[in-house]
Image (cartoon, grey):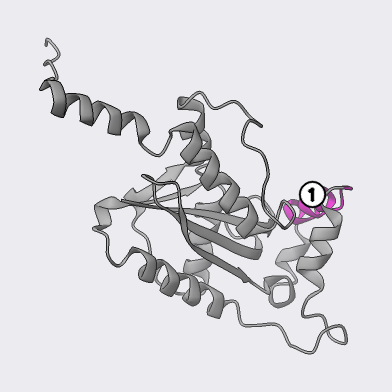
Amino acid sequence: MIDIIIDLETLGTRPGCVILEIGACAIDPRSGEITANFSRRLDEVFTRQDEALTMDANNTINWWHGPETVKTYYTLVRRGLPGMFPRTPRDPHCPLCEFAAWFSEVTSKHDPKEVRIWANGPSFDIAILQSAYDRYEVQRPWICWQERCVRTALEMANYERGIIGWIERGPRHRALNDARHEARKLYFSGALGEVSSIMLRLRQRYDIKARAVPS
């Protein structure tokens, strides 16, 4: 079993919005070890300027200009502006292909049924990333039934918000940092399958059999 946690930084909250950055990590659900990391910017803020001016984008930009996020925002959007950095914006098609290659590599030794892909909310990260794959006509690397929701899993595991401290070297709201933090929350809350593992050991030790539910 392997779990992939994805996080996006965007200019919007809906599928089709401008993506600033993709971050992801792979975690072993048995040991809690983060075994692989992925981080790429998508320079869509330069290649999709019309879409970056929607009401949804404006609301998100206003959020980014809060005191705790504005510095990170300018770190993300200024890279690639003419005259500020030596490089030119990348074709967003490239980071999507690179993520697909990374995903395939870290999951290659696992049966597809043993791969889970996690993100916050059913309508945000995964849905937005899927729309980007459709937009650039790149095959998504995951299967729809591998998708899981971090918030739902944490609530069902009775996770109390804030009990897992921030230990990343970088700031919040950088995609990889946030993905790694979500991975630790899932692991330490038991949401990655600790309860199931305990029940499995009990069944093996005591030969406990599930009773059929009366019809």
Q: Position of residue 147 (x, y in %)?
A: 40, 48
Q: Is residue 62 magenta?
A: yes
Q: Which residues are magenta?
A: 55-67
Residue depicted at x 82% and y 80%: 81
In the foreground, 187 or 93: 187
**Left or right position of 134 against 125:** left
Quarter of the image holding residue 177?
bottom right
Residue depicted at x 69% and y 77%: 47
Residue depicted at x 64% and y 65%: 21
Residue 123 visible to an observer of this rendering: no
- Above or below: residue 213 compared with residue 86: above
Q: Position of residue 94 (x, y in %)?
A: 54, 80
**Left or right position of 116 against 206:** right
Q: Secondary structure at mark 1?
A: helix
Q: Residue furthest front?
A: 205
Q: Which residue is mark 1?
A: 59
Q: Residue furthest top?
A: 214
Identify residue type, mark 1.
Answer: Asn
Residue depicted at x 61% and y 82%: 91
Quarter of the image holding residue 88?
bottom right
**Left or right position of 60 against 182:** right
In the foreground, 157 or 30: 30
Q: Is residue 35 magenta?
A: no
Q: How many marks?
A: 1
Q: Main secondary structure of the magenta part?
A: helix
Residue 190 visible to an observer of this rendering: yes
Q: Tell me if mark 1 has few (under 14), some (14-19) or many (20+) residues whose alpha carbon lies within 10 angstroms of its own.
A: some
Q: Position of residue 119 (x, y in %)?
A: 51, 48
